[in-house]
Amino acid sequence: MSGETSARDLFRQLADRTLATASTLVDELVASETFSRALAGGMQRVVGVSSAARRRLNSVGSFASEWLNVPTRHQVIELSRRLNQLEIAVDDVDAKAAEMLDLMDKRDQDD
Amino acid sequence: MTDAAGERIFSAAGRAWRATTRPYRTWRAVSTSLSLPVGLTPREQVWGLNKIKLYRYVPRRDPDQLHAIPLLLVFAAINRPFLLDLRPGYSFVEFMLDEGFDVYLLDWGEPGPEDREMKFDDYGAEYLPRAVRHVLADSGSEELSILGYCHGGLVSLLYAALVPDGPLRNLILLTPPIDMSQREDSLLSAWFDKRWFDVNRFADGLDGVLSSSAIENGAKLLKAVANYVGAYVNLWNRIDDRESVGNWQAMHRWIHDGVPLPADVFRQWVQDYLWSNALVSGRHVVKGTVVDLKRITVPILNVLARYDHIVPNAQSLPVPDLVGSTDVQTEILPAGHIGIMAGSRARESLWPKVAAWLAARSGPAS
């Protein structure tokens, strides 16, 4: 039994050391300038390719939506933006109304 | 057969069963973690705007036994805030409620393509002041304390500087990324260096938002082996400990349940904060007002995590010199960026420290 346990412990120690070594190596790699350049370049390329594909897809989607007489994605996003702005305006009005009510309460108390 | 022999056979059979089923149980723990119930402390929504929601947790004490000053929790916008309320028994929110605080949580929600023009400053200059107003209206208090975690700390500091004569009574900053001139240990500064990263080209190419999976993998890459391999080895090793597995699952869910970031928020953060360090250098202008951190005079508790690999200590340490407050306390705790709040020792280290500091500055709770 003790032989089993020690074999398991040895295996665990080996696994821990392997992980620690790999971690040190990979941490050094991701901190290098070469990696930073490659990552930045890769991110920009992926976004460049996906945005071109998305533009194409959007134009097809817009054409299909117009043909089906339903709102396009762009129109829905615009509507959502305007609703957000409206919500902010309502919150502003709510703030002003609360401020006025406070002032009126204070005035009543002074009177 | 003797009792001892029978016991040995049962024990061996149990070990064999556990060893045989370990891969299945580990796989099952991983696969069910994303549906694990989290953030279960009772709360009610008191306000909402766009995707943002303001919650008030149901107090655990009678109103006359609560601290007079409510506490607003402001989390980073790139993650869900349930890290502050992971599981019953492992929840910072629960702890603060038990300590007699009236706790509010600001959830930034999940932005969509319609939010693409939102700026980083909007969090602190547009939305946080509104949330503060609603906290005050709901609680009936004239003042409040704010706890800002990570980017939530940056947002809170921005708010405090923009509204220096406002209702803010106390400010707690947890691992806030403030001084970006300290770049030595910052991998994000290296990855997004302006010599090779064209943020405008990148942000313009996004579909309105930087996806949560991109943010998640970027964060994991900061400690790649620990996050992609070590986390699962830890689960494998602790699979027989039910409590440990529950905590692991909750953290796993939190890590994999991120939120996207509006494209212009990312652009501004890189350009104005990461590259120009404009906030610290006094060149940051929001809605025509220069952000002057020296105008902040409220008491500040600045808490850092010694082993933080996301926000290096050097980015948070200068806070006392940057603000105008005389009551600034800096604490460096032996934990990582997430472990400081959700680690197994948070209950004995961070939570009581925050509660004690705040209690001394929040009015009486009997």
Image: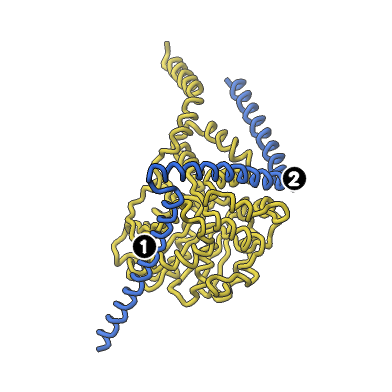
Q: Which residue is mark 2?
A: A34
Q: Residues within 10 Å of mark 2 (few under 14, many from 20)?
A: few
Label number found at residue B227: none
Q: Which residue is nearer to you in this view: B346 or A80? A: A80
Residue at (69%, 43%) from the top-left corner?
A27
Residue at (47%, 42%) from the top-left corner?
A61
Up-down relation of residue B95 to residue B366 (above or below): above
Mark 2 or 1, closer to the camera = 2
The chain ID associated with circle 2 is A
Q: Residues within 10 Å of mark 1 (few under 14, many from 20)?
A: many
> What's the coloring here?
by chain
Amino acid under label 1? Asp
Residue at (41%, 43%) from the top-left corner?
A67
Q: Quadrant of the N terminus of chain B?
A: top left
Please state the horizontal and vertical placement of residue B131, each as a whole percent of the image: 41, 64
Q: Which residue is mark 1?
A: B102
Color of chain B here? yellow
Color of chain A here? blue
The chain ID associated with circle 1 is B
Amino acid under label 2? Thr
Asked if residue A62 shows in the view, the reply is yes
Residue at (43%, 34%) from the top-left corner?
B32
Q: Are marks 2 and 1 on the same chain?
A: no
